[in-house]
Image (tube, grey):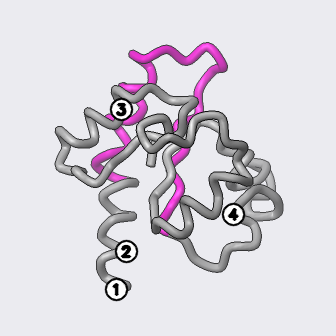
Amino acid sequence: MIDECLSPELTKIAHEKGHGEANHVVWLGLAGLKDWELKPVILDGDWTFVTKNSVDFRGPKDNPGAKGQYADVVIHAGLVCLNGPPSMDLDMQVELSSRRWSSSITMAILSIKSSK
């Protein structure tokens, strides 16, 4: 599931890369939900979540897991953070996600499949 802070174009790219199950927060009718409201949807749907708001989900960089929406979650499908400047445009999102699709998302999907 790709967060609404990122372009829906990334979902289309994920589909092209063979991740047909990829979806976008807006396409799911979840636009405007706060992170804490998205959390149960992400967990119940067993989604790997792609966002640029990494601190909101993983906690501060110097102490990941200490805070953030996933701090109290024992196991989840994964979190992919596309960290960049606040003005990150679509080209930069595509560049960062292209690097991640082949590694992070594929690894998350493989680990989910192997645990089932």
Instruction: Name the amino acid, label 3.
Output: Leu
Instruction: Name the amino acid, label 2.
Output: Ile
Instruction: Name the amino acid, label 4.
Output: Tyr
Percent x, y of residue 76: 54, 71
Which disc number belongs to residue 10?
3
Q: Which residues are magenta?
A: 77-103
Picture layout, residue 108 above or below residue 21? below
Q: Earlier in the sequence, mark 3 or mark 4?
A: 3
How many neighbours does mark 3 have within 10 angstroms: few (below 14), some (14-19), or many (20 or more)?
many
Percent x, y of residue 7: 44, 26
Residue extending furthest toward the bottom: 116
Read off the residue under disc 2. 112
Occupied quadrant, residue 27: top left
Residue positioned 48% across, 35% down in the render:
26
Read off the residue under disc 4. 70
Q: Nearer the viewer, residue 16 or 55?
A: 16
Tag 1 near tag 4, CB within 8 Å: no
* Tag 4 secondary structure: loop
Instruction: Name the amino acid, label 1.
Output: Lys
How many neighbours does mark 2 have within 10 angstroms: few (below 14), some (14-19), or many (20 or more)?
some
